[in-house]
Amino acid sequence: MGGGVSVTTTVQPMDRADFLKRGRAVFIGSVGNLVEWYDFYAYAAFALYFAHQFFPGDDVVVQQLNAALLFAFGFLVRPLGSIIFGHIADRRGRRTALTLSVALMCFGSLLIAITPTYESIGIAAPIMLFLARLLQGLSLGGEYGASATYLSEVAHPNHRGFFSSFQYVTLIGGQLCAVMVLLLLQKVFLTEEQLMDWGWRIPFVIGALLAIVAALMRRNLHETESFVAAQSVEKKESSLRALMRYPRELMLVVGLTMGGTAAFYTYTTYMQKYLKLTVQLTSEQTTLVTAGSLLFAMCLQPIYGALSDVIGRKWLLIGFGVAGTLFTIPLLTALQTASGALEAFFLIAAAWIIVSGYTSINAVVKAELFPTTVRATGVALPYALTVSLFGGTAEPVALWFKSIGQEQWFYYYLTMCIATSLLVYVFMRDTRRESAMNRHE
């Protein structure tokens, strides 16, 4: 029945062999996750350089808005990907879903790399870009649920927050890698003109090649004990139909995700454009500040994840909700008038100290809500729907407010999203203490 929780059982501490086995599985699963997110975020990182190649006109903000709308479209199809790959993960295994999702991402990245410009083929150019984002969105829709489920299930029960936090270490790391590739191309290998002309294609070629490597690595992952144990349970209905027996958990995922995903995409994908177009840093300063803040955010994830194993998940979520509601508007207002790159970095770092209360543990919280037979779909589908509405749209919403001369309205919009999630955090149970991880019905 939906809404039940597992009975607490005695758990043996990890020995060295157990730690190495779990650590290897987390590493391989995380590397594939990093590659997937690198491929997806390379689009956002290099949009400043290729938007004019696909969208004609002289207005830079409008070009970036068009590119951002396609970025958002990649999120809109994620729910479909979550249904497809969630069913595969719940019926055929986490490993199979993870391998297929990264292979699909390879095709999407390769298509972007080889697509001719608007000048060459006209309207067919943005259409091909649209198709590439379709493939990437489907892939990522499956990746999140499968990887969150896999990492949570292979983790030791006493350290599930710590191990599962590496999903966001690699998720943020994927974007950091995209930014570092941009930085190397900017400062070492190419001129600004070369980047604008053809150099922007390089990161997508790299991404396609890395995705092939990740797919090969994932073929050798061992299946989780939870999935193997659940194979004895007779499955008379589809994963999606079975998931409908857990309406409370589905709504919880939507509520706890709303504010966190809006904040995450504000300080990742949108922040690069914000630093360039609003703070008016140079291209190199924008890249350096973005890279530095992402590296800082990566370091915070396992610290917060380990802390959740001690004090519980709920208090970290409440901390994010309270601080995000109180300080989002002051932080973004101060950032808007930052006097230089160093001040901008410290302000974004302060934001990450707040947002990491959500990012570090949101995957494990969702996984702990659902039994094994519907876990991948349960984690992925409501999350993908919420990210489509509030995460992937954060950048185009912010750019639209900017285009009509009301940029600060976005600060209030983001605060409202976080405050709404705070209400959910206050009234939800602490999933560390009341977890469904051991339920296989």
Image (spheres, grey):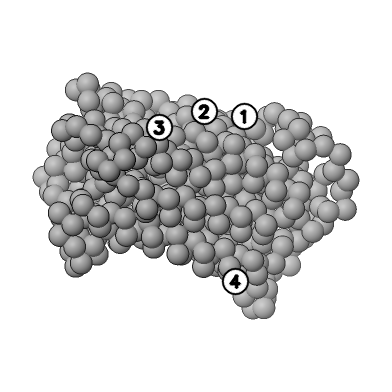
In contact (CB < 8 Å): disc 4 and disc 1: no
Q: Nearer the viewer, mark 3 or mark 2?
A: 3
Q: Which mark sits nearer the N-terminus, 3 or 2?
A: 3
Residue 136 seen in the figure? yes
Density class for disc 2 (Cα within 10 Å; few <14, some 14-19, many ≥20) is some
| Residue position for label 2 | 423
Q: Quadrant of the N terminus?
A: top right
Q: Which mark sits nearer the N-terminus, 3 or 1?
A: 1
Q: Nearer the viewer, residue 108 or 186?
A: 108
Q: Which mark sits nearer the N-terminus, 2 or 4?
A: 4
> In the image, what residue type sits under mark 2?
Leu
Q: Which mark sits nearer the N-terminus, 3 or 4?
A: 4
Q: How many marks?
A: 4
Vertical comparison of 331 with 306: above or below: above
Q: Which mark is residue 178?
A: none
> In the image, what residue type sits under mark 1?
Met
| Residue position for label 3 | 393
The Cα–Cα distance between marks 3 and 4, rounded to whole angstroms, is 35 Å
Give the residue displayed 23% in from the left and 48% down from the top: 49
Q: Which mark is residue 251?
A: 1
Q: Nearer the viewer, mark 3 or mark 1?
A: 3
Secondary structure at numbered mark 3: loop
The outermost residue toward the front is 121
Density class for disc 1 (Cα within 10 Å; few <14, some 14-19, many ≥20) is some
Residue 315 seen in the figure? no
| Residue position for label 4 | 24
> In the image, what residue type sits under mark 3?
Thr
Density class for disc 4 (Cα within 10 Å; few <14, some 14-19, many ≥20) is some
